[in-house]
């Protein structure tokens, strides 16, 4: 059976109607006979050449909404309602008919380019696989190569030989560019971008967003951007939908929503963002976590976490009302609390900035001297050795919090792994608590045991760092038995440890899959502090978390330092996060420290062009941020010897 090209048979576009529209979209999952509501009847429009944002925490239903629009829901998940594209309801089309529209009319970019790209296929093959000539035949070899090079250049890759490489041979930013080129190769009318820059550092994020915005403008694309970052949404989008527990709580023009949110949840997300220009004693955060859509179907979805909720908020699900032109809000009390919300926003923006000036911390507990790390090419003769660290020197005092910032590929994680013995420096010296730590294999048993107690690490992805088949109790008990609690009561110590990181004792029986991202990271932190270390290496510990959960974890790091006197090496590409945690900061670029000093001095008056470029790349809630050329142009962070 030959399926016709549906693009040619679609009715003529009506410029006054949305390009893509969802009506009463409901998404449910059914696992082992149990039905769970994920999205509870939302309406959504995307116009020609318009950028629309869906913003909310993990668990709000953002990604499932994006997948439903392309009928790409996973097994066990189904959708109902209407999805109208150019006059036709996609739910009324066969799977083969919809498949013909994907890539040609509707396309998708995912958060992780590795999930978009087949590791066994070259980058060029991904881009040209569905392209045809004027007669509908696959392109010839020369035409394929020329078209792949043209498409790569369109997304900012000017090296044609990238088409011959495989995804694993590229950086995260390059992979994402290839993913964008592949998604746009069929010249679609609508592009759904699901967290396309969350896993990227700030400079690469800005470049990718600029590429997407420029391509949208040149092609007249309808763009649906799914993100948890309001700053990104405000800089990219014309209109925004705030999604929470499967319901839309607020809609409006991006600039209007940024100027004055009309729902407490939107305000809470805004206030959870760490400011880059000042340090706060405590970050605002939203208590609790996102409930399931079914659990709040009969009331305001946000009522249980809202500081302004009243009994009326729990007496039925409030509709999306229209408090003013072009805006909608599902807050039934918006007229009563609007002035109070304005005052809360103003108070937060004024804030109570606290100096992060360094104090005297005594003799350094961590000393890194002229450390280099070279990764050899191995059996691949076509690749050159990579110099990850080039003579790096840093110091950390007892109880001091020190930041290490830079792009992906700058050497941050390599240095962290050298400190905890997961990598060996090629040269240089590392001393931790008076113990030489540049080669853990050469340490005597007692020195190695002491070193393991002195320094611990918290990784970026808590799910990958926890054994998925072990309960929280089993994970922590193993460490506590090594630590030998002073009172000898491992069970009591385990409960106290969970309470210290803000988790109920009942969570001990859960496995990682039953925890949220923030809860998993709390377990990872609990495991790291169980040995009562003096130094905690935190390698991008909040970059994978929603903004409100991020604020909770940052506050936890602050309280643990105050209670336990732990010293931190806090690694991040987000300067706004770093400012909240550290007193001093080192800026790492291409394996070299290019700037160091008190965090306030470095961020307020950067001396190196690379530091200035990092600061300028931080997302700003304004469209001009993407259009403005970065103040400094620097080469990519990764380099060869």
Image (spheres, rainbow, N blue to C red):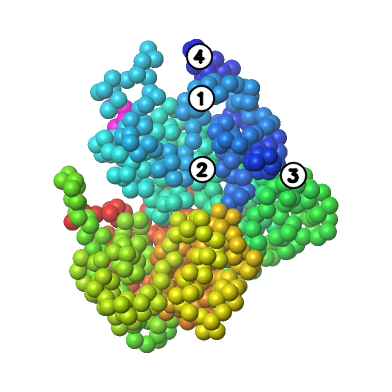
Q: Secondary structure at mark 3?
A: loop
Report the residue marked by disc 4: 4
Report the residue marked by disc 1: 99
Report the residue marked by disc 3: 320
Question: Given the current orientation, which residue lies at the most extreme left position?
Answer: 381
Q: What residue range appears in magenta?
A: 146-151
Q: Secondary structure at mark 4?
A: loop
How far is disc 4 from disc 3 in space, using C-alphas?
40 Å
Give the mark, 4 or 1, whose residue is nearer the N terminus.
Answer: 4
Q: Nearer the viewer, residue 571 or 322?
A: 571
Report the residue marked by disc 2: 194
Mark 2 residue crowding within 10 angstroms, few (<14) / some (14–19) / many (20+):
many
| Tag nearer the camera, 2 or 3 | 2
Please give left or right for residue 158 compared with residue 72 in the image.
left
Asked which quadrant contains residue 259, the reply is bottom right
* Residue at position x 35%, y 56% in the image: 408
Residue 298 position in % (x across, y down): 79, 48
- Does 19 sit above or below residue 475? above
* Residue at position x 48%, y 12% in the image: 2
* Residue 322 in view (yes/no): no
How far is disc 3 from disc 1 in space, using C-alphas?
34 Å
Task: Tell whether label 3 touches label 2 (CB within 8 Å).
Answer: no
| Tag nearer the camera, 4 or 3 | 4
Asked which quadrant contains residue 425, the reply is bottom left
């Amino acid at each position: 059976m030959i399926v016709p090209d549906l693009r040619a048979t679609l009715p003529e576009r009506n410029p006054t109607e949305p390009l893509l529209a969802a009506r009463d979209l409901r998404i449910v999952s059914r696992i082992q006979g149990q039905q769970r509501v994920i999205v509870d009847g939302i309406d959504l429009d995307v116009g020609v050449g318009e950028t629309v944002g869906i913003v909310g925490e993990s668990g709000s239903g953002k990604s499932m909404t994006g997948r439903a629009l392309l009928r790409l829901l996973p097994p066990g998940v189904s959708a109902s309602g209407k999805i109208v594209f150019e006059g036709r309801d996609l739910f009324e089309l066969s799977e083969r008919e919809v498949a013909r529209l994907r890539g040609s009319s509707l396309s998708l970019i995912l958060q992780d380019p590795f999930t978009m790209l087949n590791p066994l296929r070259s980058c060029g093959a991904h881009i040209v696989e569905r392209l045809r000539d004027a007669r509908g035949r696959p392109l010839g070899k020369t035409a394929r190569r020329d078209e792949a090079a043209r498409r790569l250049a369109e997304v900012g890759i000017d090296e044609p030989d990238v088409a011959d490489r495989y995804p694993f041979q590229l950086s995260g930013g390059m992979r994402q560019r290839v993913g964008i080129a592949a998604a746009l190769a069929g010249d679609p009318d609508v592009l759904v971008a699901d967290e396309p820059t969350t896993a990227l550092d700030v400079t690469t994020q800005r470049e990718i967003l600029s590429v997407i915005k420029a391509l949208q403008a040149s092609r007249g694309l309808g763009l649906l951007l799914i993100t948890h970052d309001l700053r990104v949404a405000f800089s990219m989008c014309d209109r925004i939908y705030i999604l929470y527990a499967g319901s839309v709580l607020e809609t409006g023009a991006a600039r209007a929503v940024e100027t004055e949110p009309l729902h407490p949840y939107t305000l809470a997300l805004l206030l959870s963002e760490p400011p880059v220009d000042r340090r706060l004693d405590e970050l605002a955060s939203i208590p609790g976590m996102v409930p399931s859509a079914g659990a709040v179907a009969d009331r305001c979805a946000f009522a249980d976490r809202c500081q302004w909720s009243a009994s009326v908020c729990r007496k039925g699900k409030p509709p999306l009302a229209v408090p003013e032109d072009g805006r909608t809000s599902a807050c039934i009390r918006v007229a009563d609390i609007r002035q109070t919300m304005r005052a809360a926003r103003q108070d937060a923006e004024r804030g109570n900035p606290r100096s992060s000036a360094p104090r005297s911390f005594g003799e350094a507990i961590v000393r890194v001297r002229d450390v280099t790390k070279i990764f050899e090419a191995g059996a691949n003769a076509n690749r050159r050795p990579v110099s990850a660290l080039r003579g790096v020197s840093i110091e950390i005092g007892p109880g001091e919090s020190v930041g290490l910032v830079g792009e992906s590929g700058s050497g941050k994680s390599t240095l962290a792994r050298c400190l905890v013995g997961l990598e060996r420096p090629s040269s240089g010296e590392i001393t931790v608590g008076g113990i030489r730590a540049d080669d853990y294999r050469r340490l005597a048993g007692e020195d190695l045991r002491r070193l393991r107690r002195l320094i611990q690490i918290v990784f970026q992805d808590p799910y990958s760092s926890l054994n998925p088949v072990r309960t929280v109790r089993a994970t922590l008990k193993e460490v506590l038995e090594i630590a030998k609690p002073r009172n000898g009561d491992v069970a009591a110590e385990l409960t106290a440890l969970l309470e210290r990181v803000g988790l109920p004792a009942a969570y001990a029986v859960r496995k990682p899959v039953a925890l949220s991202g923030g809860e998993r990271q709390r377990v990872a932190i609990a495991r790291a502090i169980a040995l009562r270390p003096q130094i905690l290496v935190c390698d991008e510990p909040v970059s994978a978390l929603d903004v409100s959960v991020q604020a909770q974890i940052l506050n936890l790091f602050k309280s643990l330092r105050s209670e336990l006197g732990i010293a931190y090496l806090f690694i991040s590409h987000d300067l706004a996060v770093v400012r909240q945690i550290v007193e001093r900061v080192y800026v790492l670029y291409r394996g070299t420290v290019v700037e160091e000093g008190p965090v306030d001095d470095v961020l307020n008056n950067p001396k190196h062009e690379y530091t200035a470029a990092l600061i300028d790349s931080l997302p700003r809630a304004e469209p001009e941020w993407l259009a403005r050329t970065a103040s400094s142009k620097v080469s990519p962070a990764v380099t060869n010897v």
